[in-house]
Amino acid sequence: MSLNVISGGLIQLAIWKAVAPKSISEKINPKSQRIFATLFTLCLIILGLCASNTPQRVFSYTKQIPWLSFLQKEEPMSELGYKYDDPEIGIFYSRINPKKLQKIDNQRGEEYAQILNKMANMNYKQFLREYNPITNPFLHELRVHIFRRDRYYKKANKTSDMNEKKEFYFTSFKEDLILRKYYKRNI
C-alpha cells in the first residue's frame, strides 16, 4: 500500500511540476474542495470498515443478521494473525495463540480427528470452504498444515534436484513438527 501511495504521489508531483497543465495552476473552487473532502472522508470510512472486518466480527454480525451468513464461507477481508517463534520449530503463523492451540487440541482433538477422518475424501478446497477461518480457525489451520506436510513430502520424492529435495523435505518436516506439537490429538 505504501508503494502505491508513493508512486501516486510521484505521478502527481510530475504532473504538477513537469506538465503543469493550466487547470492545475488555476484556483480550486470551494465547492469542488467540499466535494473532494466528502468523498475522501467516505473512502476513509469504507477503508476503515474493510480493515475492521475480521473473521470474529463477521461471525458475530452474521449471527445477528442471518441473511449475511453466506459471508462466513468467503475469504476474510482482514484477519489478524500472529507470528510465533517456537524454539523447537522456528517461525510459524496462526490465527490462534500457541497455548490456545494446545488447549483446543486437548479439549476437542478427538472430535476434530473424527471430522478429518469423515472428510478424508473431500476435495481440499471444498474442505477449506466448509471449515473456514471464520467458523473454525483451528480445524482450518490443521487441514492446511496436513496438506502442506503431505504436498511437500510428495514434491520432495518427485524431484531429482537435490536443493529442491532438501527444501521440500525441510518444509514437510517443519509442518510435521507443528502438527505433532500443537495438533497431536488430530494426527
Image: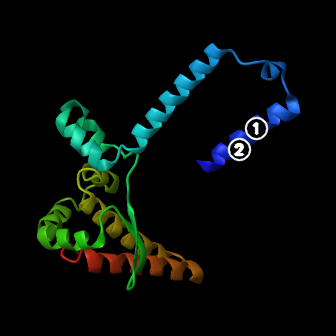
Count of numbered labels shown in the rendering? 2
Work out whether 4 lies above or below 175.
Answer: above
Distance from the alpha carbon under mark 1 to that under mark 2: 6 Å
Which of the labelled discs sits on residue 11, or is there none? 1
Under circle 2, the secondary element is: helix
Q: Is residue 2 left or right of residue 138?
A: right
Work out whether 60 lies above or below 178.
Answer: above
Which of the labelled discs sits on residue 7, or is there none? 2
Q: Residues within 10 Å of mark 1 (few under 14, many from 20)?
A: few
Residue 161 seen anywhere in this rendered image of the structure: no
Q: Position of residue 67 (x, y in %)?
A: 22, 30
Tell me where residue 91 sits by quadrant.
bottom left
For this orientation, the residue located farthest to the bottom is: 88
Q: Position of residue 11 (x, y in %)?
A: 76, 38
Residue at 38% in and 60% down: 81
Work out whether 20 lies above or below 174.
Answer: above
Work out whether 89 lies above or below 142.
Answer: below
Q: Is residue 79 left or right of residue 20?
A: left
Tell me where residue 104 sits by quadrant.
bottom left
Q: In front here: 149 or 157?
A: 149
Residue 144 seen anywhere in this rendered image of the structure: yes
Residue at 71% in and 44% down: 7
Tell me where residue 153 sits by quadrant.
bottom left
Residue type at tag 1: Ile
Q: Are marks 1 and 2 in contact (CB under 8 Å)?
A: yes
Quadrant (top left/top right/bottom left/bottom right) for the C terminus:
bottom left
Residue type at tag 2: Ser
Under circle 1, the secondary element is: helix
Residue at 55% in and 29% down: 40
Residue at 23% in and 51% down: 135
